Image (tube, helix red, strand yellow):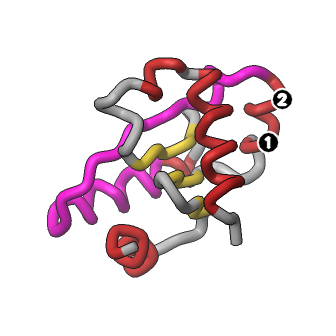
């Protein structure tokens, strides 16, 4: 389990790689860390779309290919990853996991 400080640090590193995520529109959103050509990332995108049909949720797709090599390699074997302001959810996860994240 990741603590709030490690999530905050991680989100700050992602913002350093993608400064547009630090704006007021994106800073509080969930971020889906993924990349093009990743089958599991496509599965999670579909899962999130289905979830959005019953729960209001916005998220920002963040391509790890936009990161520097060090940060990209940190996620290369764990994507897709959902980052909220306080939690990290590594795949595999389900609709129930998303519901729990939304409630927290």
In the displayed structure, 72 sits above or below 93; it is above
Horizontal placement of 26 versus 87: left or right?
left
Q: x and y percent of residue 78 in the render?
A: 71, 53
Residue density around tag 1, few if under 14, some if 14–19, many if 20 or more, within 10 Å: few
User: Which residue was labeled with disc 2?
Assistant: 70
Of residues 29 and 42, the one drawn nearer to the viewer in this rendering: 29
Q: Is residue 52 magenta?
A: yes
Q: How many marks?
A: 2
Of residues 7 and 35, the one drawn nearer to the viewer in this rendering: 7
In the displayed structure, 15 sits above or below 73; it is above
For the point 53% across and 52% down, the residue is 83
* Quarter of the image that includes the C terminus: bottom left
Horizontal placement of 2 versus 91: left or right?
right
For the point 57% across and 63% down, the residue is 89
User: Which residue was labeled with disc 1?
Assistant: 74
Of residues 37 and 29, the one drawn nearer to the viewer in this rendering: 29
The circle drawn on residue 30 is none
- Which of the 4 image quarters holds residue 20? top left
For the point 81% across and 24% down, the residue is 69
Query: Label 1, label 2: how many angstroms apart (C-alpha)?
Result: 6 Å
For the point 59% across and 69% down, the residue is 92
- Which of the 4 image quarters holds residue 99? bottom left
Element marked by disc 1: helix
Element marked by disc 2: helix
Q: Which residues are magenta?
A: 42-68
Q: x and y percent of residue 103 in the render?
A: 33, 75
Q: x and y percent of residue 36 in the render?
A: 55, 32
Labels 1 & 2 near each other (Cβ < 8 A): yes
Residue density around tag 2, few if under 14, some if 14–19, many if 20 or more, within 10 Å: few
In the displayed structure, 15 sits above or below 29; it is above
């Amino acid at each position: 389990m990741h603590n709030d400080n490690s999530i905050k640090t991680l989100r700050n590193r992602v913002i350093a790689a993608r400064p547009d995520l630090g704006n007021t529109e994106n800073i509080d959103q969930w971020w889906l860390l993924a990349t093009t050509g990743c089958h599991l990332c496509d599965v999670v995108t579909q899962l999130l779309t289905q979830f959005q049909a019953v729960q209001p949720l916005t998220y920002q797709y963040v391509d790890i290919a936009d990161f520097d090599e060090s940060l990209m390699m940190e996620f290369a074997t764990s994507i897709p990853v959902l980052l909220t302001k306080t939690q990290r959810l590594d795949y595999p996860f389900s609709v129930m996991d998303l519901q729990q994240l939304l409630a927290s």
